[in-house]
Amino acid sequence: MQSQAFSSGRIRLVTYDRRDQCLTLTWENKTITAFRPVPEEIFQRLSRAPNPASYFEDRVAEEYPQVTPKRSIQDDNPRQKLNDLFGR
């Protein structure tokens, strides 16, 4: 699995699973969206885009079907849930 983190902007993390061709985005409000099937080249371009959110809107949002994101290991961590709730 490949990933690219962003320190600013609406998109904070993009992950790509080559096996499933699944592109998963974590947004600044902690919402997670996933799209499949997405070619790896789209992940690469999104990762290098000067404005990833604009690239996403122009090249991904309407081109690829949205799917239910896989459950994250982090979802089972109660400490992480509290830290997210209280902004730590």
Image: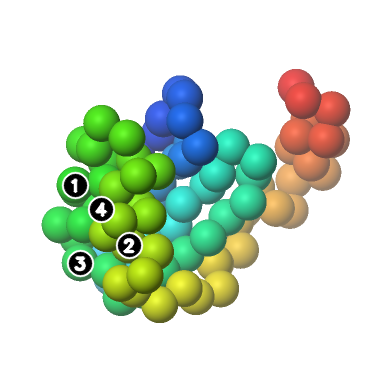
Q: Residue at x 63, y 51 (%)?
A: 31
Mark 4 and mark 1 residues within 8 Å of each other at the beta carbon: yes
- The residues tagged by marks 2 and 3 sit, at their Cα atoms, a distance apart of 10 Å
The numbered dot on residue 15 is none
- The residues tagged by marks 3 and 4 sit, at their Cα atoms, a distance apart of 7 Å
Upstream in sequence: badge 2 or badge 3: 3
Q: Residues within 10 Å of mark 3 (few under 14, many from 20)?
A: some
- The residues tagged by marks 4 and 2 sit, at their Cα atoms, a distance apart of 10 Å
Q: Nearer the viewer, mark 2 or mark 3?
A: 2
Q: Which residue is mark 1?
A: 45
Please state which amino acid type lies under the numbered disc 4. Answer: Phe
Mark 3 and mark 4 residues within 8 Å of each other at the beta carbon: yes
Q: Is residue 47 above or below residue 16?
A: above
Q: Nearer the viewer, mark 4 or mark 2?
A: 2
Q: Which residue is mark 4?
A: 43
Q: Is residue 9 above or below residue 39?
A: above
Tell me the element at label 3: loop
Residue 83 is left or right of residue 52, and the answer is right
Tell me the element at label 2: loop
Q: Which residue is mark 3?
A: 39
Q: Residues within 10 Å of mark 4 (few under 14, many from 20)?
A: many
- The residues tagged by marks 2 and 1 sit, at their Cα atoms, a distance apart of 11 Å
Q: Quadrant of residue 38?
A: bottom left
Mark 2 and mark 3 residues within 8 Å of each other at the beta carbon: no
Tell me the element at label 1: helix
Upstream in sequence: badge 1 or badge 3: 3
- Rendering coords of residue 5 (x, y %): 40, 33
Q: Is residue 2 visible?
A: no
Please state which amino acid type lies under the numbered disc 1. Answer: Arg
Q: Residue at x 25, y 53 (%)?
A: 43
